[in-house]
Image (cartoon, rainbow, N blue to C red):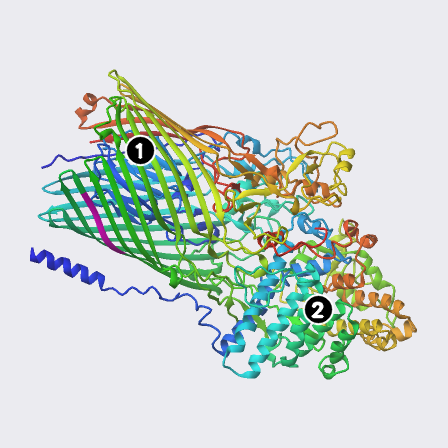
Amino acid sequence: MKKYIFILTVAITALAGCKRDFDAVNPNAPTIASFWKTGDDATKGINAVYSTFYRTASLYSRWMFYHGILKSDEGFGSGGDGGLNNLMRFNQTNYNDGLTAQTWSTLYVGVFRANQVIANVPNIAMDETTKKRIVAEAKFLRALFYFNLTLYYGRPPLMLAPSQPKDVPANATTAQAYAQVAKDLNEAIADLPVSYPAADLGRATKGAAYALLGKTYLQQKMYQQAADAFAYLVTGAGSSTYTLTADYRDNFIITRENNSESIFEIQFSENQSESTDDDVDESRINNTGTSISQFFAPPGVGFSDGAARRWVVDEFLQERTVTNAQDPRLAASFIFNNANPAGPTATIVYGQTFQSRYGTGPDANGVWFRKLLNDHWKNQEGFRSPNNYRLIRYADVLLMYAECLNGLNRTAEAYPLVDRVRQRAGLATLTVAKPGLNQTQFLTQLKHERLTELAGEGWRWADLQRWGDLGPALATRDADFTGFIVGKHEVYPIPQSDIDLNSNLTQNPKY
Amino acid sequence: MKKGNLLNLFHVHQVGNLKRMLALPLVMAAMAYPSYASITKNNALEIKANKFDVTITGTVKAASGETLPGVSVSIKGGGRAVVTDANGKFSISVPENATLVFNYIGYTAKEVVVGSNPVVNVTLESSDTALDDVVVIGYQTIRRKDLTGATGSVSTGNTEKRAYQASGMAIQPGVANYNGRINTDWVDETLRTGSVQDYNASISGGGNGSKYLISGGYFKDKGVLIAREFERASFRVNTETTKGRFKFGENLAFSSSTSKAPFQGGAFAGNPWYDMFSSVPLIPVQDNALISTNNPGGWGYGSNGNINTFSRNQVAIANITSVKSNFAKIIGNAFVDFKIIEGLNYKFNAGIETSFDKSKSIRKDGSWYQNQSPDFSQLSDNRNQFLSYLLEHTLNYNYVIGKHSINGVVGYTEQTTQTDNTFGSGIKLAQFGGEYFDTLTSTAGEGRTSSGTRYKNLLDSYLGRLNYTYDDKYLLTATFRADKDSRFSPQFRTGYFPSGALGWRISKEDFFKVDWVSDLKLRASYGVLGVNTLGAYQFIGFLNQAPDVVLGSGQVTSPGAIQAKLASGDLRWEKKKTTNLGFDVSLFKDQFTVNFDAFRSVSEDVLLSQPLPGYLGNLQGDPIVNIGSIQNKGLELNLGYRPKLDGEFKWDIAGNISIVRNKVLSLGNLGIDTETGQPKDYIQSGNTRTQVGRSIGEYYVLKTDGIFQNQAEINAHKAQSAYAKPGDIRYVNTIDGGTNDDINDKDRVFAGSAFPKFTSGLQFNSRYKDFSLSIQLYGAFGQKLYNDVLRDLDSYGNSNYRRAINPWTPSNTDTTFPRLGYQFAANDRGINENARGNTDRWIEDGSFLRLRNVELGYSFPQKLISKANISSARLYVSGQNLFTITKYSGLDPDVVGANPNLEPGVDNGNYPSSRIISFGLSVGF
């Protein structure tokens, strides 16, 4: 009997003696409470905000170019993606459609990340200059995300602190949203450096913040504020940092990335061994390239989900260079039968003549956007294009500044800015070609200049929206605009699922 | 030597050769591994056992009424196992919808599907007389003849299958270059006749205070979908020895399973139950002319400008991809029971469950759909070890003083559950002579990844139970549990769960003198149950270290880190409070039995994945939060008739009906609804809305109102006049406000619930001489299903269209089917509107009545077989799911929803039940 009790006692004490730690930490990842302690944490945090650019197809890895290029009158959905084609022709019945709803939510992924940096980094004990710079970078990126949200969705709710599951914000007005963008940029400008060491190229600079600030004001036609911002880059301290490259094409090829014309550039690299475009999949390798080239490349090379309208080509043909040549920007911008003026037998498309690829077939008159492609260094495309996207370049700034000055009725001062852009392309200066334009005429001319300089770079939609040109009248250029309803299709619908989950949100007009 | 009970069971199931008429393996596997689909989808094993825990309690009794201690209660297909205590009681945490298996020496094993009722009381039949099993589904209990357990409570339906049959009648816009020679039957290419084999053998015996049981089994299931297979071998040893005041015992079970399947899920690999119907017959499965760099296998799929479809070639997927998984599992427990004094026992039980799971996914070179990213061949190797151990100390007491009987238990238990995972992947598999190497080392170095995780959680519990009966007339049970679980937020870890039950056996009262009532008992109970469906570490946000950025002139990748998934900081126990009133009556010498129950259960602080709006920027799934409370009320009636017959013909019949009403009582603070100014009271998930005062996940969609027959009707309706043409669907313009406003999401209305109005079952058993016949029917009525497969097919998109459509034309106006047109045609928005997903066009009546099982058996006469030293031999043939009466046009009205919590009736390619013909032989020696 005693033996039994002894055995039982041993058994009980042995097993009751085990320490049971109910507060053991997750061994797989630090909690958010244990992060944000060092300068290294701050750097990792801001890096993760940039990482949003590569996430899924919904931002600069693909769809942002659909929103900015294909939806406008210069392009259209030309491939087998019926949902895309319908969206590009303003036919959307599902407000949770991935093309609009995922771009929305991914932009907010970026906002959430930027908010974490802005909320947490100021409390870190670290080098003060770096700390301020990192917070300023986060504000720049938050501004960029909200700029896109406002441009494409009109009335985004403003999330300015790290998200909590029960946050139920109301819509901001467009003016409120742009005001927040401007506020962030103004704050960022103070702490962003003019430039970075080579290893940090790609981070937001003071010039980038000024340029985006100018864009933000210009989009609201706040010409004076916009001009003040652009002045930094054109006449102010930033003017020594940026110049137009000698060769227009340098802005679209992989060997001239981060050049003197680049103001903000999304850095892409080709990672052949990537296995995911979900940048939070910790067990896989992230795709840091863009797949837009695969989707914009012409048939036989890529999917050709988007293509350009022919009228844009004609726009270039209105004018020849001072040496009586075809505007070099045309062939830099598009692949089409006469990219080489000698015609389809002389035009080379990914290593073959246009004639041999498309001959007299259904694609003989096709026009494809070239700037985001890789035909300058290889004969196929893929999902991992390393060709950086020059989000804002100096020529854009010069033309925007000109638009501001013209808007302020300082048209004469605007001429030299346009001249610089035209001269680089080999055209006669506007001062020579079209002197003495009045304010209205000059704006009309600027529309032509922006189209020819910036075709297929993603700004056409913003331009049309700002100029008030969006409407069914554009159907003569782009039949997709037949379905355009004024007062509705200037912006996308806010995802219905967000409205269903937050009754403080309301849908955009007429949706 | 005590009489040994030697038993050998031998079953062979031959699945019907009716092509396309079954689907067992994945259903099986779905039971064994609650998320089989996610195994293949994520190429990763997930141990689900700790994800959807519900605590089930109950009592196991023998048919004679005595409680059975020491019965093994385990989760089918794995997970933990417990044994019943001295009073036949058990308590086990199980995943939702798990199947419990009850095993006891000398008794026929029994399986019970766990429904929403947390109490499962089971009666085991002595193995030589076993006839009926009890299957509990939800609140409804039906009796059925058990076949092997393998086919469990699988339900099926095929009657409407033909509605989907692909055919050469495709109307395919954009099809240019066809000569009509190809006519691929994709359904035929994707399905095959499956088969199931199931063998079991066991031996048991004992003597001198010891008993033992050894059993082994083999199960193989070849799926109805191509390239799917499941196989399991199992082995079990149970022993028990009594020596003096001690009783020792152990139960040990080992099983090894393998499964093979291609990739499945997502936009990448798709769902065969969509693709087999939407694939265009004009595309060949495979053709040498299609061979290209990205398509070395020459697989057929869509291409722009030719046949513009994005349907995936599931035959190609089956050839190019594979996931092979192996699960080796050991479940065991050992106990010692010590009698301290008469009526007071101490028992120590140690249980362990461990499994070693590996899964290897291989993707060879090749493509299977239009616009697929041309990826390298790749391989991933995923290893999991699951370990759960349980230490239980219990004191049992049992006193009888005169007419007073008191017994009960107090105890303390500790449970630890841990999952370790290691994952590696690589790309560019080495090839030699066309054969792929399949190890990580054989892949190219530059694309290798590795990762590993560990999840661990603890559960400590104090428990106590008191049973008191007086004169077998008055019965009282009181129980109490205190559970502390590490998965909740620190301040909310401990939960207290009391319950009590009263019984009054009126028939024992002296004043009760009604001879035709043999037994009458009234019951009442109230209890609180703790529910935990969480995984480890979900109460706090974590850092994700995967994001990175490309920087610098060298385009170098620099690491980032950020919180990606939101977390609720105050996760606590979900509490389910159940009140039950009922009575049991036996009449006319137990020939008639009636059981009636009325219950109301309220789940408070329900743990649900909360769908989050996009503006929160949340990634990696919706966080789990405690949301509001949900009520279930119901009535359940069981009737049985077993006439006492003297002749050779014996029969009995039992039926039941169950009515359960589900209602959301509150949903916590969801802000203010700007439209009404009132607090917001709903959660939207897909096309369903869970709203206070209604049942969970009611459909919330646009209402259709027939077809526009002419332009005048369109003009009169106004809202769709900008684009509609005769033949288009007319939607109800719910919110109009007198203006000509368009049809949009504001016009949505509630359109039915996925919950049946009632369910019912019927079981008939009969025996004549050596023959037996049993029939089982099951029906569910009044539920609505959303047929997403049909929506995909009838949207006139880039897919095959089905044969049965009856589109509107000016000369065919008497139809509910809109005019034909291509969904993506330019400037025909009417077609696009007809294809809307958020409308009641896709909602169908899901009522069904199913002949779940018919079995005809023959037992060989004793004198014939005894010469061969065989004690029993029985031959049977059975048919499962031989017919289903339903109006539902999908494959199977018995749908498990896309999101079972919030969208319970959405059929998005549900794996259908199969029609199974079985032949079996069981022999006892």
Q: Circle 2 sits in a helix, a strand or a loop, which is it?
A: helix
The picture places residue B381, in percent across and down from the top left corner, at 42, 57
Label total for image: 2
Instruction: Compare residues B736 and B222 and report the one nearer the observer.
Output: B736
- The subunit letter for the residue under badge 2 reads A
Q: Are the residues flagged by discs 1 and 2 in contact, CB closer than 8 Å?
A: no
State whether residue A244 appears in this view. Answer: no
Image mark for residue A407: none
Label 1: few (<14), some (14–19) or many (≥20) C-alpha neighbours in 10 Å: many
State the residue at coordinates (67%, 54%): A507
Residue occupied by mark 1:
B11
Mark 1 belongs to which amino acid?
A: His
Q: Are marks 1 and 2 on the same chain?
A: no
Distance, label 1 to label 2, CA atoms, is 71 Å
The kind of residue tagged 2 is: Phe
Which residue is identified by label 2? Answer: A252
Residue at far left of view? A1
Q: Of helix, strand and loop, which one carries label 1?
A: loop
| For residue B641, above or below residue B235 | above
| Region of the chain picked out in magenta, as a range | B406-413
Q: The N terminus of chain A lies in which quarter of the figure?
A: bottom left
Decide which of B599, B619 is in the foreground and name it. B599
